[in-house]
Image: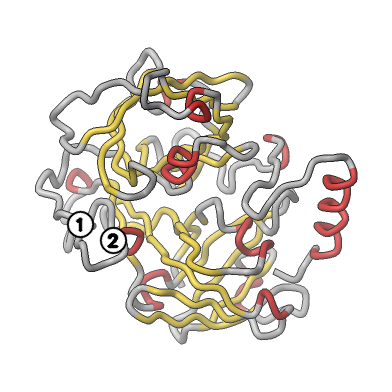
């Protein structure tokens, strides 16, 4: 993540001197500076993303982490902008929150109640992106425009949700002996014979070959650039400006290796600064059936603010090797 480090440092200084200081993970994000990594084009059946600008884009049932990421459950969005969570997708949840959209911003607030923290009744302001493959919804990501003072909501919203089609109703119960972030939301099928059998799902990476291929990511926030990250079968990776350039090492972009031990993924970047030499994550490969769609990172420990912020948005699949 060494490229543009000086430019980012200057922008941080500008924020601080103007009275706007942001902690790691709290970068401001003007919508125009982060266009979709792969824009959705009608008629193209490829992984893509778009900024959500109306409730109708997300109406339905979604599988994700709830209760401050302490459980896995379902979130149901209704056409009138209400939503709530449930453990049973066949049961309508109690509507506990509302969402509305203005100028591509999502304003989320809890409905006031005796046990609802004041910070949750106030609006949390998010940018939501819908990840699709063609016209089919796959995942929903939510990134705060500024820090959300509702801690539980911020925790839940830090992870993507998967669109739930009703397939796989006998979902396994979470394993209490395994970190919840290291467990799939909707396990992927072992085999998909027809497109009709496919549905949004995810796997937790346990070996480097789980995410071999070329993906696109934001280079470093809050810059506009996107780059292409190639994971090779020999556990090496490299960043480049185009998919074609990932076949050769460049002096301008980062290179490194990846190791995995019991779902803990360690990224090594030996030629970077001390704080960016290593970072550990859980990695979810979001798929449509057996087709890769997006790569989602959950940080375990990473002192590299540039890498951490670049990976708060899931990477989008470009192609295999």
Cα separation between marks 2 and 1: 7 Å
User: Where residue 52 sits: x, y (%)?
Assistant: 51, 30
- Which residue is located at x 63 percent, y 56 percent? 309
In front here: 11 or 23?
Answer: 23
Q: Which residue is mark 2?
A: 183
- Which residue is located at x 14 percent, y 50 percent? 171
Is the residue under label 1 in contact with that under label 2 (CB below 8 Å)? Answer: yes
- 300 vs 42: above or below: below
**Circle number at residue 294:** none
- Quarter of the figure with residue 240: bottom right
User: Where residue 89 sits: x, y (%)?
Assistant: 18, 34
- 135 vs 275: above or below: above
In front here: 138 or 123?
Answer: 123
Crowd band around label 1 with a 10 angstrom C-alpha radius: few (<14), some (14–19), many (20+): some
Quick one: which residue is furthest to the left in this view? 170
Crowd band around label 2 with a 10 angstrom C-alpha radius: few (<14), some (14–19), many (20+): many
Q: Which residue is mark 1?
A: 174
In front here: 38 or 116?
Answer: 116
Horizontal side, residue 166 vs residue 84: left or right: left
User: Where residue 200 sits: x, y (%)?
Assistant: 29, 47
User: Where residue 217 sits: x, y (%)?
Assistant: 59, 57
- Which residue is located at x 80 percent, y 57 percent? 8
- Which residue is located at x 69 percent, y 64 percent? 241
Q: Quadrant of the N terminus?
A: bottom right
Q: Earlier in the sequence, mark 2 or mark 1?
A: 1
Callout 1 secondary element: loop
- Quarter of the figure with residue 60: top left
Callout 2 secondary element: loop
């Amino acid at each position: 993540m060494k490229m543009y480090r000086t430019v980012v440092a200057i922008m941080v200084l500008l924020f601080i001197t103007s009275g706007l200081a942001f902690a790691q993970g709290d970068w401001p994000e003007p919508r125009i500076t982060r266009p979709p990594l792969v824009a959705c084009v009608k008629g193209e059946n490829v992984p893509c993303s778009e900024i959500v600008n109306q409730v109708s884009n997300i109406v339905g049932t979604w599988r994700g982490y709830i209760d401050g990421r302490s459980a896995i459950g379902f979130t149901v969005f209704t056409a009138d902008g209400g939503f709530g969570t449930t453990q049973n997708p066949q049961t309508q949840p109690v509507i506990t929150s509302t969402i509305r959209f203005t100028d591509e911003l999502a304003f989320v607030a809890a409905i006031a109640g005796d046990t609802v923290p004041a910070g949750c009744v106030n609006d949390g302001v998010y940018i939501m992106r819908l990840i699709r493959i063609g016209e089919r919804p796959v995942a929903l990501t939510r990134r705060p425009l500024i820090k959300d003072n509702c801690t539980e909501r911020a925790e839940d919203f830090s992870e993507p949700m998967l669109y739930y089609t009703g397939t796989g109703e006998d979902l396994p119960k979470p394993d209490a002996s395994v970190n919840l972030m290291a467990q799939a939301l909707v396990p992927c099928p072992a085999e998909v014979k027809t497109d009709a059998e496919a549905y949004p799902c995810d796997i937790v990476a346990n070996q480097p070959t789980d995410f071999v291929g070329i993906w696109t990511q934001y280079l470093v926030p809050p810059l506009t650039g996107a780059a292409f990250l190639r994971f090779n079968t020999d556990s090496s990776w490299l960043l480049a400006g185009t998919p074609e350039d990932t076949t050769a090492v460049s002096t301008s972009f980062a290179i490194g290796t990846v190791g995995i031990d019991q779902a803990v993924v360690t990224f090594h970047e030996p030629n970077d600064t001390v704080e960016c030499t290593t970072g550990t994550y859980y990695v979810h490969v979001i798929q449509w059936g057996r087709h890769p769609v997006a790569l989602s990172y959950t940080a375990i420990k990473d002192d590299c603010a540039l890498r951490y912020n670049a990976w708060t948005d899931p990477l989008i699949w470009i192609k295999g090797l």
